[in-house]
Amino acid sequence: MRVHCRKIKLAPDVELASIARGTPGMTGADLENLINEAAILAAREDAEQVTADHLEQAKDKVLMGGERKVALSELERRITAAHEAGHTLVARLLPGTDPIHKVTIIPRGRALGVTQQLPDDDRHYYPRSYLMTRLTVLMGGRVAERLVFGDLSTGAQNDLKVATELAEKMVCQWGMSDVIGPVTFSRGEEHPFLGMKLAQEKSFSEEMAWRLDQEISRIIGEAEQQAEELLTGSRVTLDALAGALTLEETLDGKRVDEIISCAVPSAAAGG
């Protein structure tokens, strides 16, 4: 980042080490893009220096997509807030999850809301326990909608897609199912450029295909059940997070911790 900032005047409040901690896995080109975006934001404001806020906004754009102008009804905003609050609270309640960096109900990219978790370090190995917590966090949005509104929406479409793909890899590629065992099965070759799977001849029986499907569904169902148990037992905190999101639209990790710490005593008193 210092290399790409050589020709840019930075404000005294900029801590590149702090920004760098929020960009694990980024390539040099990604970091260059981030710095350029921050410089563009500063230029639009006729600012003489690139500030920490410019860099933070640029990082959000690179990681989560640019903000979109979408006219949402009050009910849709509340559904989005409950959904993102579900992801956030499950991530905070489960041990071993990546820290919450920011959660927002401002539409970005193709999403109406985003819960952003950033690992403290680059990861190269993913234990089964970590992947299960990841699945549980993914299911938290859907579960929260059902708890708060007694209904489900299409908002969990991408969560379900990601969860299904992750569970399929756990079962079929990584040998993380005790039922299926330490074997791998190819269910279609992923093509990185087409963004789709190419059909290929099956090398396993119809019975095994059925067992694979059942195991994938079981793992996702287990994650959903755990998310439901966590959110049902912390309903007061869930409502507090959803309410804060509806009012403030964006919460950083520190603000999330404040809301949770204030809601916990209330929950205990109510019990």
Image: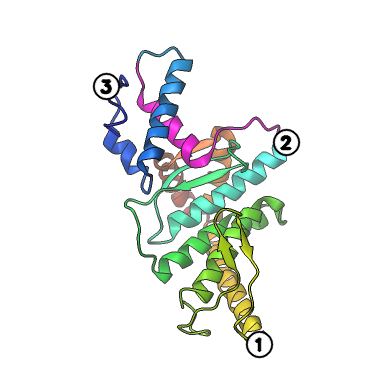
Res. 103 in view:
no
- Which secondary structure, mark 2? loop
Q: CA distance from mark 1 to mark 2?
A: 47 Å
Three-letter amino acid code at disc 1? Glu
Residue beneath label 3, please?
A: 12
Disc 1 to disc 2: CB gap under 8 Å:
no
Where residue 124 appears, x then y in whole percent? 35, 61
Query: x, y (%) of residue 133?
Result: 46, 64
- Give the residue type that dot 3 points to: Pro
- For marks 1 and 2 on the same chain, the one whose residue lies earlier in the sequence: 2
196 or 240, which is in the foreground?
196
Percent position (x, y) of residue 19?
33, 36
Q: Classify mark 3: residues with Cα within 10 Å, few (<14), some (14-19) or many (20+).
A: few
For marks 2 and 3 on the same chain, the one whose residue lies earlier in the sequence: 3
Q: CA distance from mark 2 to mark 3?
A: 41 Å
Is disc 2 surrounded by few (<14), some (14 to 19) or many (20+) residues within 10 Å? few
Residue holding disc 2: 73
Q: Secondary structure at mark 3?
A: loop
Residue 120 or 48: which is nearer the viewer? 48
Report the residue at 54% width, 63% height from top.
Answer: 227
Q: Which residues are magenta?
A: 49-73
As shown in the figure, which amino acid type bears the numbered disc 2?
Answer: Ser
Q: Is residue 12 left or right of residue 84?
A: left
Mark identifier at residue 207: 1
